[in-house]
């Protein structure tokens, strides 16, 4: 079974390919020579994920899924959320986004936060499924560690003494929001039987 992953990010493709059974072959947009940027103008992660998966499904008429992730901070009413990639501006760097979050939080004692991943899977226009993965933790007062990307250096998952930025990629992958969402989709795919 071939499944299109509506992403240009090869790391994400490798991550999911390692989880799904070998009879499912994940194809990225790069492999399909699809270079058109997909508009992400949704009001939340669900809308964005759905928009991407439907756009790509319409193009290829083949089973397809997409992913959208955001960092949700309780004291910031869920921000940066769907705006995580561009929180400090259109071309903001990870460092600028992190600095904006830290500045907004200041010395706020409630540092609770979570990463949330939404996967939208379009098997056909009538069969659309969503999967959610969470990783719950706290935002530290300053960055720690140099690994990972995005908000990893300021996010410490519950039950761990290290930030994501201090973990190896396999340590992070074992507990990450994306892994949880991928595993849910994987269990679904293993059981999936096409009605056609
Ligand atoms: P995307 O939807 O996976 O592209 O994620 C959007 C933005 O959320 C990224 O640009 C990062 O700023 C942030 N983000 C997503 N996943 C992670 C993660 O695992 N660690 C840190 N930041 C992340």
Image (cartoon, rainbow, N blue to C red):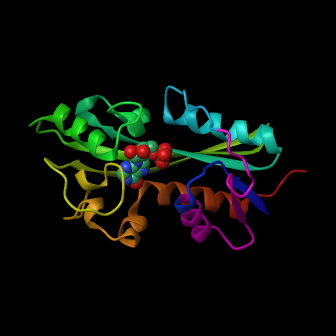
Specify the quadrant of the image occupied by residue 144. Answer: bottom left
Instruction: Inspect this view and state whether residue 134 appears.
Output: no
* Residue sitting nearer the eye, 147 or 122: 147
Furthest toward the left, the residue is: 107
Instruction: Tell whether 151 sits left or right of 19.
Output: left
41 shown above or below 180: above
* Residue drawn where x is 76% and y is 42% of the image: 57
* Residue drawn where x is 38% and y is 47% of the image: 115
43 shown above or below 56: above
Instruction: Tell whether 51 sits left or right of 101.
Output: right
* Residue drawn where x is 72% and y is 62% of the image: 191
23 shown above or below 73: below
Furthest toward the right, the residue is: 196
Instruction: Inspect this view and state whether residue 186 appears.
Output: yes
* Residue drawn where x is 58% and y is 63% of the image: 16
Location of the N terminus by quadrant is bottom right
How far from the left and from the top, in percent, is residue 55? Answer: 71, 36
How far from the left and from the top, in percent, is residue 183? Answer: 55, 61
Q: Is residue 16 magenta?
A: yes
Specify the quadrant of the image occupied by residue 186. Answer: bottom right
* Residue sitting nearer the eye, 55 or 35: 35
Give the magenta-colored segment's residue range.
Answer: 12-36
């Amino acid at each position: 079974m071939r499944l299109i992953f509506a992403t240009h990010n090869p790391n994400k493709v490798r991550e999911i390919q390692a989880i799904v059974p070998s009879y499912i072959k994940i194809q990225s947009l790069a492999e399909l020579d699809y270079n058109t940027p997909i508009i992400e103008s949704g009001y939340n992660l669900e809308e964005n994920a759905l928009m991407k998966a439907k756009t790509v499904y319409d193009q290829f008429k083949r089973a397809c899924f997409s992913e959208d992730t955001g960092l949700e901070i309780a004291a910031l009413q869920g921000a940066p959320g769907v705006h995580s990639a561009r929180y400090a501006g259109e071309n903001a760097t990870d460092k600028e986004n992190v600095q904006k979050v830290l500045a907004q939080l200041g010395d706020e004692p409630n540092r609770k936060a979570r990463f949330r991943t939404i996967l939208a899977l379009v098997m056909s226009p009538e069969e659309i499924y969503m999967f959610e993965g969470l990783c719950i933790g706290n935002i530290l007062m300053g960055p720690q560690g140099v690994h990972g990307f995005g908000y990893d250096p300021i996010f410490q998952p519950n039950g761990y003494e290290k930030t994501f930025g201090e973990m190896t990629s396999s340590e992070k992958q074992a507990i990450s929001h994306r892994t949880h969402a991928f595993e849910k989709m994987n269990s679904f795919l293993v059981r999936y039987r096409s009605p056609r």
